[in-house]
């Protein structure tokens, strides 16, 4: 059994509302957070005490995505659209008004930006022309999370209609419709090493799917309440989940065994729902954000 020692390194404050969005910068020493107060903040893992305000928008921010190829930050501005920030001079390059709905997730592949919205759309935007290429209506319910396969040939969407829909990334033709969750799907991630897609959601369960034929391999009752997000470590050996039950859980990515629970009682963790987690490529620390308006940085010693 793997032994893990947990050290809480930092608690960062500054946001005035729940923190919903989290993205690592092209240089993984830095990361971004976005919140209900419309603030997007840049943080430095080497000196994390003071964040730097990058943008302030009128409505809440649920989604952030970094275009590492162009060194740009894409901000999902609820009830408006997207804002694209140049990360060299930290100025807005362009914006596009695309929706009057919430934007729950953004992913980028090549020249395409994929935006998942509350009215069941995946909106595809061309970064070169800065225009909408396609509206893909995939449900009457919200598109909550998107994931792109390691091979870059498929995009999966987790929805509030309890399904996971998988599309060919190039043609956007539907390939698979996965039905197993009993409630909204909030968390989705492809294992970087193996042919596996892992999903989680409001039913508090993790589903392990074979990403070849998308057959269901395993179901794990993983948390007490909704699983909000999951993230793999860069080497793919472990992944973390976070939940409305205020806990972070560390899992072995090969055996799917639970290795560690990080919570308020044991490690002075978050006091409310944890909305997202990231496993830093810079120092292998875990970053978590919460409804309690705080960011926590965790060091795990294996």
Image (cartoon, rainbow, N blue to C red):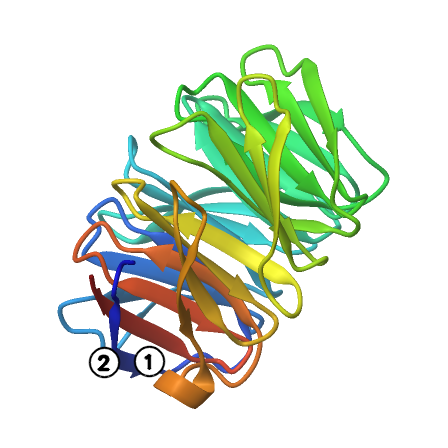
**Position in image of residue 92 (x %, y %):** 40, 49
> CB under 8 Å between callouts 2 and 1?
yes
Q: Residue furthest top?
A: 171
Q: Is residue 102 in view from this perspective? A: yes
Label 2 vs label 1: CA separation? Answer: 6 Å
Residue identifier under label 2: 49
Residue at image position (45%, 47%) is 256
Depicted 190 relative to depicted 295: above or below = above
Which label belongs to residue 97?
none
The location of residue 80, given as percent across then percent down, is 66, 51
Q: Say what secondary structure mark 1 lies in.
A: strand
Local crowd size for mark 1, using a 10 Å CA cut-off: few (<14), some (14–19), many (≥20): some
* Residue extending farthest right: 140
Q: Circle 2 sits in a helix, a strand or a loop, which is it?
A: loop
Task: Tell me if residue 271 comes above or below residue 139 in the rendering.
Answer: below
Residue visible at 45% across and 25% down?
Answer: 195
Q: Is residue 187 left or right of residue 71?
A: right
- Residue 13 lies in quadrant: bottom left
Residue at the spot of label 1:
12
| Quadrant position of residue 263 | bottom left
Residue 38 seen by the camera: no
List x then y, in percent, for residue 60: 60, 65
Q: Residue at x 66, y 41 (%)?
A: 158
Q: Locate the C terminus and report the quarter of the image it occupies.
A: bottom left
Looking at the image, residue 134 sits to the left or right of residue 91; the answer is right
Q: For this rendering, which residue is in front, 259 or 8?
A: 259
């Amino acid at each position: 059994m793997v032994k893990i020692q947990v050290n809480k390194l930092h608690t960062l404050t500054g946001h005035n509302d729940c923190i919903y969005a989290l993205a690592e910068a092209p240089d993984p020493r830095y990361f971004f957070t976005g919140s209900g107060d419309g603030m997007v903040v840049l943080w430095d893992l080497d000196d994390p005490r003071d964040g730097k305000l990058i943008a302030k928008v009128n409505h809440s921010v649920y989604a952030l995505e970094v275009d590492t190829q162009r060194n740009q930050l894409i901000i999902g501005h609820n009830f408006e659209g997207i804002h694209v920030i140049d990360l060299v001079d930290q100025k807005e390059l362009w914006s596009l008004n695309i929706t009057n709905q919430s934007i729950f997730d953004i992913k980028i592949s090549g020249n395409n930006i994929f935006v998942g919205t509350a009215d069941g759309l995946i909106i595809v935007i061309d970064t070169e022309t800065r225009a909408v290429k396609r509206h893909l209506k995939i449900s009457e319910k919200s598109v909550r999370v998107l994931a792109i396969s390691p091979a870059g040939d498929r995009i999966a969407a987790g929805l509030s209609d309890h399904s996971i829909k998988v599309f060919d990334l190039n043609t956007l033709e539907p390939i698979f419709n996965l039905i197993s969750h009993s409630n909204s799907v909030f968390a989705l991630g492809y294992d970087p090493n193996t042919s596996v897609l892992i999903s989680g959601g409001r039913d508090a369960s993790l589903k392990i799917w074979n990403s070849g034929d998308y057959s269901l391999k395993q179901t794990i009752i993983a948390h007490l309440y909704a699983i909000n997000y999951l993230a793999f470590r860069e080497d793919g050996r472990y992944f973390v989940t976070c939940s409305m039950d205020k806990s972070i859980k560390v899992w072995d990515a090969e055996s799917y065994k639970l290795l560690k629970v990080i919570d308020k009682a044991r490690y002075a963790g978050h006091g409310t729902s944890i909305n997202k987690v990231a496993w830093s490529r810079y120092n292998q620390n875990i970053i978590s954000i919460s409804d309690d308006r705080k960011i926590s940085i965790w060091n795990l010693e294996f």
